[in-house]
Structure formats: structure tokens, C-alpha cells
Image: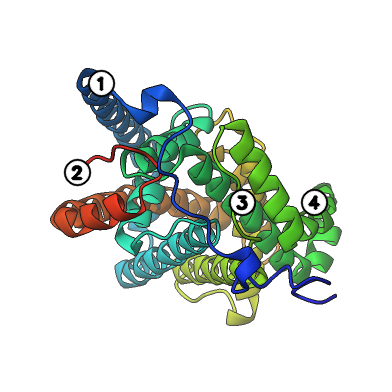
Amino acid sequence: MSANGPEGAGDIGSEELASPPREAEPSSPQEAKPSSRFARTMHVVRYLLILAVVGFTIWYFSTMWDSVLPALERMNPWWVAASALVLLIGMAMNVLAWTTLLHGLGHEVPFVRSAQIMLVGQLGKYVPGSAWAYLLQMEIGRQYGVARARVLVTSLYAAGIGVVASLILGTIALPQIAQGHPELLWLFLLLPVGLACLHPWVMTALANLMLKIFRRPPLGHRVRLRTTLGALAWSLGSYLTYGVHLWLLTDGTVPLADLLLMAAALSLGFTAGLFAFLLPSGVGVREAVLIGLLGLVMAVGEASAISLVSRAMFTAGDLLTAGLAAGAAYALRRRLHKVDAATTEYADVSDA
């Protein structure tokens, strides 16, 4: 199959597929000429939502601490520190996957701004009902001139590409999964569907449908194949890095050859957790998958301890990276505001 399709679908450098002009007037009168009172109210609402979500995340972290501490005390602190550092690198790769998609969908923003939108917004997953993460990302993006629909499409495709990446890694451990945990095999039915959705024609059509629902202009170009492949590569790199994070928590007692199995276990746990959308960040489901697969190479008790510590480290990492992204955006707010104002899809854009 040609990457560009029969008519050069993957190439947006041609004149007929030029980048869309920036929308001068939004589709609704309220967005075109917002009252100062309405704008101030929405600004306050967004920050109250962020504070509420951060509060939920901190509360969630505190509830698990008493269970995590005994397991953490039995681990080598240097290995744990190395695991935490590797985890942060994996999270940065995840942001790069999200940013690659946002740029490919027609809105280029600096990395700091995209990190702020993605990382602060995703804290909403700790509120029961994971739709809060998408809502918060949409509202933060809207505050800085990115259409809500474009942020939503980016986040949905990032989740979908994450599923594809997890299943690709899972195929490496398919013999072990089929032998020890055949109940997980149904997940692999999603792989051909996911791969089909990564085709530029399909991805562009779905993105335009979502934009139409939100009454936004369609993309003026077809999404390039290198956009989806780039996001997929970053997502695969992120999951492999998470596998290293898990391996380091074993203090090196598990053979390095099992690193791919650990990466597959964690990534499949994330995918299974997506279906438990009423639970905060898929809690319980991810651990069940992770413990089940780690139990193939270590004692179940050790797998349970590593799973618990990893969950706590992910929560702490989410809070830390969100704080760093928000702090960096605040420090660079004047420079970022110039970019926001130049690329905004609305008549107003916050300089906060």
C-alpha cells in the first residue's frame, strides 16, 4: 500500500492541500463577541475545574500511600530513583506523541503549551468518569485559542494510537499471554481496527466528522502518514520506557530479556483500563492485568508490590509533570501569548 495513496493523500505539501486559512470569525456569535463578564466567568470556571481535579488527584494519591510505603521500603532506593527518572522520560515521550497529532491536525503550538494542555488536562482521569480528562483538556486548549474539537480529536487519537502501540508490543508476548492468560486475547481483535483508523484517509474523515459536530471548519489538508507514524513511534518508545521503569523496580532480579514482557504487561494494562472508564485512571483493572502477566516471571506477591508502587509513581509523576508544565507556561507566558494570538481559532484568547 502506498503511504500517499493513489492521489498523494499523504502529502500535504501540494497546493491543492494547502494549510487551511485561520478562521477569522467563529461559528457562534457568543464566541465571536464574548462579553467581558462571560469571558471572566469562563476563566474562573476553568481554574476552579483545574483546582478540583488536582484536589481529586492528591486525595487519590494519599489514599494509597499507606499501602505503598511498606512495599517501597523493601526496595533499593537507588533503583527506585532510577525508575522514577525513566518514568518521567516515558511521560515526556507521551506528550510528544500528543503534540505530533495536534500539529498534524492543523494547529501548531509550542511544546510547553501542548504539554500544559495535555498534562494538566489528563489529571481529570483521576475523577471517576474519565471523560473529565477530555473536558479539562478541551477547556484549557480553548483558553489558549485551540478549538475544543481539535483538542478532543487529538486526545481520542492519542488514546487510540496508545491502544495500537500496546497491542503491537503485546504480540511479542502473545505466546505467554495465550498460555497463561487467554482471557486477554480478545484485546487483539482491536488491532486491525486500530491500524485501519491510522490510515490518513480514515483519520482525516473521522477528524472532519468530529469538527463538523462541533461546528468547526474541516481540515484543509489530509493528515499525513508521517503524523500517525511519528505519534505511534513516540507511543511505542513511551511504553518501552515504562517497561524499563518496571524492570528497575525489580532491583535487577528479573532477567533483562523479560523487559519486553514487562513493557507489554504495562501497556496492555493501560488498554484494559480504558474500558473501566468509571474508575479513576482504570484503577484495579490495570493492576489485575499487570500482576497476571508479571506473575509469569516472578512471584505473585512481588508482582503485586511492584504494581502498587508503579501505580503510585505514575500518579506522582502525573502531578509533577503537570506542575512543571504549568510552571513553565507561566514563566514563558508573554512569549507563548504571542504564539497563541497568532494561531488562535477564536476571536479572543487568554493571556493568563
Type of amino acid under label 4? Leu
Which of the two labelled residues, at mark 2 and mark 1, occupies the earlier sequence position?
1
Q: Nearer the viewer, mark 4 or mark 2?
A: 2
Contact? badges 1 and 4 (CB < 8 Å): no
Q: Residue at x 63, y 36 (%)?
A: 212
Q: In the image, 1: left or right of 224? A: right
The front one of 144 and 66 is 144
Q: CA distance from mark 1 to mark 3?
A: 34 Å
Q: Position of residue 167 (x, y in %)?
A: 73, 60
Find residue 35 and name its label. Answer: 1
Crowding around mark 3 (Cα neighbors within 10 Å: few <14, some 14 to 19, many 20+) is: many
Q: In the image, 254: left or right of 51? A: right
Q: CA distance from mark 4 to mark 3?
A: 14 Å
Residue located beneath label 2 in the image: 351
The front one of 52 and 198 is 198
Q: Which quarter of the picture shows residue 45? A: top left
Find residue 190 and name its label. Answer: 4
Contact? badges 1 and 3 (CB < 8 Å): no
Q: CA distance from mark 4 to mark 2?
A: 42 Å
Find residue 97 and name its label. Answer: none
Q: Nearer the viewer, mark 2 or mark 1?
A: 1
Q: Position of residue 154 (x, y in %)?
A: 54, 50
Residue located beneath label 3 in the image: 157
Q: Residue at x 44, y 60 (%)?
A: 95
Type of amino acid under label 2? Asp
Instruction: Determine whether the residue tagged by mark 1 lies in a helix, strand or loop.
Output: loop
Q: CA distance from mark 2 to mark 1?
A: 16 Å
